[in-house]
Amino acid sequence: MKYFFLFIIYVAGLVVSSLGLALIIKSGLGVGPGDSIAVGLSMHLPVTVGSVMIAAFIILLLVNARLERKRPQYESLIPIILRGRTLDLFLYGSLENLDVEVWWGQWGIFSLGLLATAVGISVYLRTPFPRIPLDHFMMIMNEKTNQSKSSIRIFSESGMALIGFLLGAPVGFGTLIVAILLGPLIQWTFQWARPIARLWSDSEKQAAQKA
């Protein structure tokens, strides 16, 4: 029963993070660094942002396997598809007509999106289920380089923002803020979400004791 509850939390975290990404995109202040590549490619190809993201994540899944020298984590297709499809549902569905022109409204939407993205990522990372390849890449590099999650995030997202800019994506001041602040926000909310990890770690300890 605990694992069913954890799976609900897992899906909720993914959906909240997708909502956050969509809000950042719709704020008009600049897309997130990781999303800039998907947005840029969708501007040149007849596909949605979520579809490009799914394809990019599958490639990164193979890169992660190479870095870890393990088999590709095909189970990560679950969060990959959930992230891509829910992002499209927000962008081309409930938030499609969201168009805020006043500066305070744009910053409000942007700030809410940034916080939702960090909270959603931290919540789902605290569960024992498969990770999105980008977040798993962050964890791999965190272990291999012994650098903080925030430092790894800042470095990787700065590189992605540059690629997105070259593809013609709307990279702006908001993109820089996401690159600088999303990592530290994930670091902070990851600690806040620690009780979620205790749910499944306690279950494993109880199972080991019974065995």
Image (cartoon, helix red, strand yellow):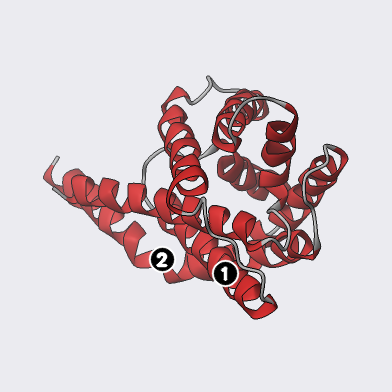
Q: Is residue 118 left or right of residue 82?
A: right
- Residue 51's spot in the image, x, y percent? 56, 29
| x, y percent for residue 172 | 80, 59
- Measure how far apart labels 1 and 2 are at the Cα level: 23 Å
Given the current orientation, which residue lies at the most extreme right position? 166
Q: Please state if 193 lies on the left or on the right of 103 as rendered.
A: left
| Residue occupying image coordinates x 66% and y 69% | 101
Vertical position of residue 127 compared to residue 23: above or below: above
Task: Please name whichever residue, 191 or 50, is drawn nearer the observer in this view of the structure.
Answer: 50
Q: Quadrant of residue 62?
A: top right
Q: Say what amino acid the circle numbered 2 marks.
A: Ala
Residue at x 31%, y 54% (from the top left corner): 9
The circle drawn on residue 193 is 2
Q: Amino acid at mark 1?
A: Ile
Query: Where is mark 1, residue-wise?
Result: 109
Residue positioned most to the top? 71
Tag in front: 1 or 2: 1
**Residue 157 position (above or below residue 49):** below
Residue with the most extreme bottom position: 104
Tag 2 secondary structure: loop
10 Å crowding of disc 2: few (<14), some (14-19), many (20+): some
Q: Position of residue 141 (x, y in %)?
A: 68, 44
Who comes first in sequence, dot 1 or dot 2?
1
Residue at 33% in and 61% down: 196
Who's the residue at 51% across and 50% down the image? 96
Say which of 2 and 86 sits in front: 86
Q: Secondary structure at mark 1?
A: helix
Query: Horizontal and vertical percent for residue 57?
Result: 59, 31
Q: Position of 44 compared to 24: left or right? A: right
Q: Nearer the viewer, residue 2 or 162?
A: 162
